[in-house]
Amino acid sequence: MISFSRTLLENGLKVIVHEDDSTPMAVVNILYDVGSSDEHPERTGSAHLLEHLMFGGSANIRAYDREVQKAAGENNAFTSNDITNYYIQLPAANLETGLWLESDRMQDLHFTQKGFDIQKNVVIEEFKQHYLNQPYGDMWMLLRPLAYKIHPYKWPTIGRDLAHIENITLDEIKEFYYEHYCPSNAILCISGNVKADHCFTLAEEWFGPIEKRKKTSRELPQEPRQRRSRKMNVSRDVPSDEIVLAYNMCGRKSPLYYTIDLISDLLAGGKSSRLFRHLVMEKKIFSSINAWITGDRDPGLFIIRGKPANNIGIEHAHEVILGEIGDFTRHPPSGKELLKVKNKLEATRQFAHANILQKAMDLAYHELLGDAGVINDEIGKYREISTTDIRETSGSLFDPGNSSTLYYCSNHKQP
């Protein structure tokens, strides 16, 4: 059970505090309700670029990282399809420094053409290094527009096209910042060796004076149901073939989310899972295989990704995966197999939540979804899932018409 307190400032900022006196540390976590899905289709990559700019200094703090280091802290951030999350972990005695830093860059980020050009070049190099020049690096750039035709999940967080980042202007980024970075579009979560009342007082002191701005309404186009399978075949200079299957699934708030999450663990959650045991260990058809869910707020994807062994054709490998999926649907796990996966999931969650940073991020995200308190109900939701639930959900999820398949072939092998 993760206990917490919360309040709402007059400018719309939600504040959550989790007290944990087992550590001398504290975490200041700010979640902004904006991600790559909020970008203009011709300016993709804006949210991630702005994340970089947030470390370039604000009106009163020109060297953000230096101030964090002076407070014996460390900081980082990430951007996803749905959110942008920033955190500082530092000694609890220096908590106010973290709040000062975050409030100042929420209120008035320091924009300069020089800083903008530097960070734009950094992101351009990141795009090239990780997505264009790395083996299998463009996988998401191929798979997302195959699986999504309307929803902005059809482009990756880094951006759809390098030209979008190259052509974006400082004024456009400033507009994106002022549109989305405001108190009513953010959740502040403080976790660690702190007291809730003191944190609420500090939050009011540092964030309360920030002007209230209208939160931008999000009206994303909804992806129509996919009824026919899709397939793409590409050839690249990579060491071996790879096959990626994507099945459309529900969004994060759906009750079915928990069942599908368990299905991914049953199929590929470790060496005793179905796909790894059958296809890697026993039949040796794959050298590696994995399955996971994207966990997006809107309907996301169930991914199966594997590298066939060198002597296995990619089409045959695809047929074998489909055979395993069909067998799983017809013969769902026994009660013992399901209980084993549930126990492992619960242990993993409990271990993760021993970390105050993970608790802060998860509390903020669940509050974004509607209620931070749901974090304490999730294990119970997993426990209630039956083998019948697994069978019924698998039959719908793994409908062949609901699939998008990428054949990522080595130049030296063709299907």
Image (cartoon, rainbow, N blue to C red):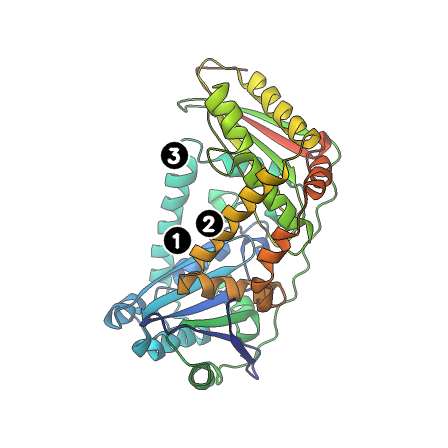
Residue furthest out toward the front: 336
Query: Rounded to the nearest whole Å, what is the CA distance between mark 1 and mark 3?
Result: 18 Å
Location of residue 10 in the rendering, given as x and y in whole percent from the top left corner: 57, 84
Query: Rounded to the nearest whole Å, what is the CA distance between mark 2 and mark 1?
Result: 7 Å
Query: Rounded to the nearest whole Å, what is the CA distance between mark 2 and mark 3?
Result: 17 Å
Mark sitting earlier along the chain (1/3): 1
Question: Disc 1, disc 3: CB below 8 Å?
Answer: no
**Front-lying residue, 274 or 106:** 274
Q: Residue placed at 64% from the left, 41% from the top?
A: 148
Q: Residue 214: which quarter of the image? A: bottom right
Which numbered circle lies on residue 133? 3
Mark 1 lies on residue: 120
Mark sitting earlier along the chain (2/1): 1
Residue 317 appears in view? yes
Under circle 1, the secondary element is: helix
Under circle 3, the secondary element is: loop
Q: Residue 354: which quarter of the image? A: bottom left
Q: Amino acid at mark 1?
A: Lys
Question: 225 left or right of 277?
Answer: right
- Front tag of 1 and 3: 3
Image vertical order of residue 360 relative to residue 100, above or below:
above
Which numbered circle lies on residue 165? 2
